[in-house]
Amino acid sequence: MDERLARDPAAIRAMFSEVAPRYDILNRVLSLRQDVRWRRRLVGALGEAPAGPVLDLAAGTGDVALAVRDRVVIGGDFSLAMLALAGRKARRLGRRVAWVAADALELPFSDASFAGVTIAFGVRNFVDLSAGLREIGRVLAPGGVLAALELQRPRHRLMAGIVRVWNGLVVTPVGRMISHDGDAYDYLPASVDTFPDRVGMAEVLVGQGYTVLESRDLSGGIAALTVARWEGA
Ligand SMILES: C[S@@+](CC[C@H](N)C(=O)[O-])C[C@H]1O[C@@H](n2cnc3c(N)ncnc32)[C@H](O)[C@@H]1O
């Protein structure tokens, strides 16, 4: 758990590979299907991006990449187990997405390759948030758009209390039971508590050369959508 909270890449990759087979069902149950709505908002934010290909980073089982329409899409993740499930899902849906094994902090793409980058529930796991956002900027064309969806600790005290109870009574025990990884669903709330909220995220983005176009709470501040334009190195 300590290694995970230090965002050690090997520990994070092993954790996601372990939970991959149960990841989708746990997402739906533990978020009461809010995750589906949140991802729709994330993909909608690509309307701010110029025409061109999109990279969905930390693609997991592919739900974001598969929701992007009318663009060339690449899904990147450093867990091969996740990518295998994403590939299977794409084949079932008759969709063509290129799935690429990639660490977000060292992307195997040339500078300015993409018009847009999406990332859902991924940045929270980066070993170095600033370096990750800079690397995403490198592969974005100037004027390209990063849309990031992330969980956060709600600022409203009542909402924060509800989330704490939900995490304690449902997320951790149910996650533990279904995922076969004792610690993964302890890591989830702990990683949210130790990650910047959308205001902090916006500050880091600006520090790395982005202009923030949108920063909004979703579902009472449980999650946040941040949309930012890369201004070029
Ligand atoms: C919580 S899942 C999110 C999956 C998907 N985006 C979704 O909406 O359900 C986080 C994913 O990020 C991947 N990941 C975490 N850190 C990464 C990194 N540095 N580079 C590439 N993938 C990473 C994990 O392997 C995992 O599949």
Image: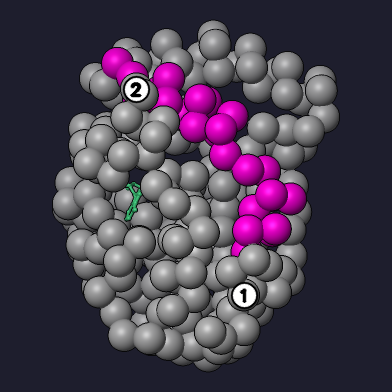
Identified at 51% across, 25% down, the residue is: 190
Residue at horizontal 48 percent and vertical 69 percent from the top: 134
Toward the viewer: 153 or 73? 153
Tell whether circle 1 marks a residue whose Cβ is less than 8 angstroms from ligand 1: no
Q: Is residue 161 magenta?
A: no
Residue type of the residue flagged with mark 2? Met
Give residue 209's position: percent from left, percent from top: 62, 75
Residue displayed at 42% across by 26% down: 187
> Quarter of the image holding residue 180?
top left
| Pick the front one: 117 or 21 | 117
Q: Amino acid at mark 1?
A: Gly
Q: Is the residue marked by circle 2 packed among few (<14), some (14-19), or many (20+) residues within 10 Å?
A: some
Q: Position of residue 64 (x, y in %)?
A: 44, 59
Query: Which type of secondary structure does the marked residue at label 1 adopt?
Result: loop
Q: Is residue 216 visible?
A: yes
Residue tagged 1: 209
Asked if residue 141 is positioned above or below residue 81 in the image, the reply reads below
The magenta segment is 182-205
x and y percentages locating residue 150 in the rendered image: 57, 47
